[in-house]
Amino acid sequence: MHVFEVLADPVRRRIIELLAPGEMASGEVVAAIGAEFGITQAAVSQHLKVLRESGFATVRAEAQRRLYSVDIAGLRAVDAWIGQFRNFWEPKLDALATEIARGKRERRNAPLTKRSGKRA
């Protein structure tokens, strides 16, 4: 499955968001996702399996618990694909940052009579 097919599903994206801060037990993931999306434990388990098999999540056993965490490999694949287009938007974002800074500087240096509203 292509990485963007994996991320196209809102449940899987939400699971990745839940795992981002650190490990979670499968039961915690099931409870959170079940409450949010109204899906069964079996459905959540299928989503976790897709995330594992596509390189977005890892699992480790701790006694009877299964602890899931984000696997950076899947995110690297996304970053690599997006990286092809960085040259397209980075200069535009740099130009935007320059214009924003210029506007702030002009407002800061404008005489008080020309300013509208209160000074921040």
Image (tube, grey):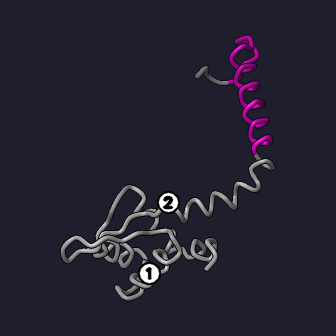
Q: Is residue 35 above or below residue 109?
A: below
Point out residue 90 in the picture as x, y percentages from the top left corner: 75, 43
**Type of secondary structure dominating the magenta stretch:** helix
The crowding category of the residue bearing disc 2, from other C-alpha atoms within 10 Å (few below 14, some 14 to 19, many at least 20), is few
Neighbor class of circle 1 (other Cα within 10 Å; few <14, some 14-19, many 20+) is some
* Element under disc 1: helix
Q: Position of residue 20 (x, y in %)?
A: 42, 58
Q: Which residues are magenta?
A: 90-116
Which residue is found at the position 66% from the left and 58% from the top? Answer: 80
Whether residue 49 is situated above or below residue 85 in the rendered picture: below
Does residue 98 sit above or below 26 in this rendering?
above
Q: How many marks?
A: 2
Residue 72, which numbered label? 2
15 in the magenta segment: no
Q: Amino acid at mark 2?
A: Ile
**Which residue matches tag 1?**
49
In reply to whether residue 114 is colored magenta, the answer given is yes
Q: Amino acid at mark 1?
A: Lys
